[in-house]
Amino acid sequence: MPPRRKKKEPRDILIETIVKAMTDKIARNPVIMDLSGIKGAVCDAFIICHGNSRTQTEAIADHVIGEVKKHTGENPWHKEGFENAEWILIDYSDVVIHVFQEERRKFYNIEQLWADAVIKKVDTKEE
């Protein structure tokens, strides 16, 4: 008898849905940062990527919101940054998404700021 599959946690389904939506829109260098082991962290995970233009950054963020709603029924608790689309933040409480334009991502360097996090790079077709 094959081993039983472990049921996925809602947070894992949310993260998978977000990452899939990002890669659908050819997001650049997506990473999942696990902050759950960091005392005082604002959430359990950051998911970060960037786009090559304002149009792509907006498209990634819009697609993430739509796919999460479609697959999990969840709406973001908070979202901001759509005005100039240089850094769009989408907050699902335990999981926070950062969609940058490349220059802003380099400038803010969140991966270095939260260097204690466990960082997992997402494989994409483009890389």
Image (cartoon, rainbow, N blue to C red):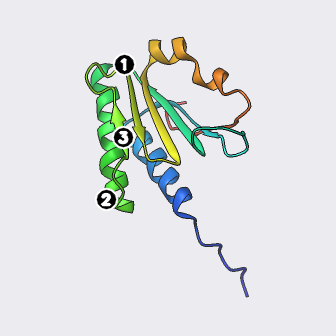
Q: Please indicate whether residue 124 sits to the left or right of residue 39 in the image.
A: left
The C terminus: image quadrant: top right
Which structural element holds mark 3? strand
Of 47 and 1, the residue lying toward us? 47
Where residue 82 appears, as percent x and y from the top left, is 28, 27
Where residue 86 appears, as percent x and y from the top left, is 36, 19
Most distant residue in the bottom direction: 1
Q: Please indicate whether residue 122 sits to the left or right of residue 60 in the image.
A: right
> How far separated are the C-alphas under marks 3 and 2?
18 Å
Where residue 100 appears, as percent x and y from the top left, is 43, 24
Vertical order, 74 against 39 (above or below): below
> How far separated are the C-alphas under marks 1 and 3?
17 Å
In this rendering, the label closer to the viewer, 3 or 2: 3
Where residue 16 appears, as percent x and y from the top left, is 51, 53
- Residue at point 52% right, 11% down? 107
Residue 60 visible in the shown view: no
Earlier residue among tags 1 and 2? 2
CB-based contact (under 8 Å), mark 3 and mark 2: no
Q: Based on the displayed image, in which of its 4 quarters is residue 61 positioned?
A: top left
Q: Which mark is residue 70?
A: 2
**Few, some or many residues within 10 Å of mark 3 (<14, 14–19, 20+):** few
Query: Which amino acid type is marked by label 2?
Result: Lys
Which structural element holds mark 2? helix
Q: Please indicate whether residue 123 sits to the left or right of residue 96 in the image.
A: right
The N terminus: image quadrant: bottom right
Query: Which amino acid type is marked by label 1?
Result: Glu
Residue 30 visible in the shown view: yes
- Residue at point 39% right, 61% down? 72
> How far separated are the C-alphas under marks 1 and 2?
26 Å
Q: Which residue is mark 3?
A: 78
- Residue at point 72% right, 79% down? 3
